[in-house]
């Protein structure tokens, strides 16, 4: 029992038969020309886009200064900021033990 239905264009090993090759022959040149045209169009659009983007000049765009941060700004990492009083308490505990 075959899983795929049999076609008259393929043999029992699903290779193209001579009738399929004859049926496709009139369209061979037309399909090749269409494929080449599509490839040429795609490459042309890609080349034009890369060329257009490469010409952009951003020298007239002002670059803003870096924002000023206060010297006592809180840490932005995972560590919690520790106050000076907490540090003093830790020092005293170490000295006592």
Image (spheres, rainbow, N blue to C red):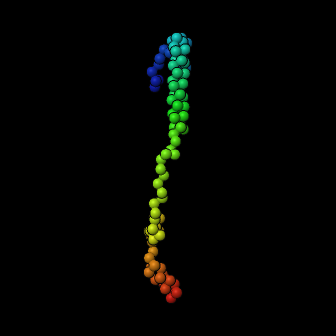
Residue plotted at (45% across, 74% down)? 82
In-front residue for pair 92/4: 92
Above or below, comparing residue 66 to residue 42 in the picture: below
In-front residue for pair 65/73: 65
Number of residue marks: 0
Q: Position of residue 76 (x, y in %)?
A: 45, 64
Above or below, comparing residue 97 to residue 69 in the picture: below
In-front residue for pair 50/93: 50
Q: Residue furthest front?
A: 60
Residue plotted at (54% across, 31% down)? 47
Above or below, comparing residue 75 to residue 57 in the picture: below
Can residue 1 be seen from the camera position used here?
A: no
Q: Residue furthest bottom?
A: 96
Residue plotted at (46% across, 24% down)? 4
Q: Position of residue 20 (x, y in %)?
A: 52, 14
Residue plotted at (47% across, 47% down)? 61
Q: Which of the 4 quarters of the picture holds residue 85? A: bottom left
Q: Position of residue 44 (x, y in %)?
A: 53, 28
Can residue 9 be seen from the camera position used here?
A: yes
Q: Position of residue 74 (x, y in %)?
A: 44, 68
């Amino acid at each position: 029992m075959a899983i795929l239905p049999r076609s008259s264009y393929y043999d029992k090993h699903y290779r193209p038969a001579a009738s399929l090759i004859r049926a496709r022959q009139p369209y061979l040149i037309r399909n090749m020309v269409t494929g080449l045209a599509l490839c040429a169009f795609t490459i042309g659009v890609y080349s034009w886009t890369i060329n257009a983007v490469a010409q952009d000049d951003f020298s007239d765009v002002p670059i803003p200064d870096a924002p000023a941060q206060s010297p006592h700004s809180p840490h932005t990492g995972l560590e919690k900021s520790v106050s000076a009083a907490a540090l003093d308490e830790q020092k005293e505990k170490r000295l006592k033990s």
